[in-house]
Amino acid sequence: MACEPAFAAWVTGLPASGKSTVAAALKRHLAARGIEAAVLESDELRRMLTPHPTYDANERDHFYRAMIHIGRTLVEHGVPVIFDATANRRIWREQARRSIPRFIEVYAECPLEVCMARDPKGIYRRGRKATGTVPGLHEPYEAPENPDVVIDCEHGDPEDAAAHIILKLVGAGFVPIETG
């Protein structure tokens, strides 16, 4: 039996918006359908690619280009990919869409104030004490103009969000309809 071609789903949003929680739920939902996806989580990948990050514009550009390359390579080799990354500039997500034919963009919508109140990694707390490069605080976050899926990460449930993303993947023909 031939494998379905792989795809990529980029979950973007402000830091602490709930991207990682949604990405983990999506990975579980896909696994329940027999689809093993790789999650490219930006913090984890950044530790490998830029062990002493400065988060300046050149470094971010290099990092996201490398992340897109890794994701595209995985998809080309039949591995579905979930990007779990802020990618605060639209240009990086658009580059991923252009280079990965079977691609969807998921916007984890959450107000900055809610993200700042959550702040599980202390990003905003540290950012308020100094000049920095925190998207939404020091750097602009360019929300998607036409995301394939918008999920409410302020009030919504991550499992429901993952199910909604699955419906989009099924509708796009990226994931087979469940039978049985």
Image: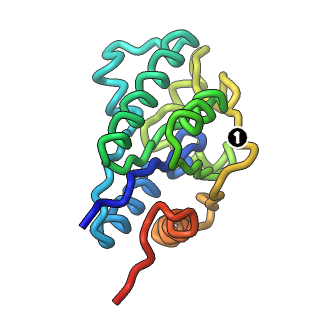
Q: Tell me which residue sits at (39%, 52%) in the image.
A: 6
Q: Is residue 20 above or below residue 26?
A: above
Q: Quadrant of residue 96?
A: top right
So how many labels did they put on this image?
1
Q: Is residue 96 above or below residue 131?
A: below
Q: Tell me which residue sits at (56%, 51%) in the image.
A: 104
In the picture of the structure, the residue carrying the numbered disc 1 is 143
Q: Is residue 177 left or right of residue 45?
A: right
Q: Position of residue 5 (x, y in %)?
A: 39, 54
Q: Position of residue 117 (x, y in %)?
A: 58, 47
Q: Is residue 54 above or below residue 108?
A: above
Q: Secondary structure at mark 1?
A: loop
Q: Tell me which residue sits at (45%, 20%) in the image.
A: 63
Classed neighbour count for the residue bearing mark 1: other residues with Cα under 10 Å, few (<14), some (14–19), many (≥20):
some
Amino acid type, label 1: Ala
Name the quarter where the C terminus is drawn. bottom left
Viewer-proximal residue among 152 and 149: 149
Viewer-proximal residue among 35 and 154: 35
Q: Position of residue 38 (x, y in %)?
A: 31, 47
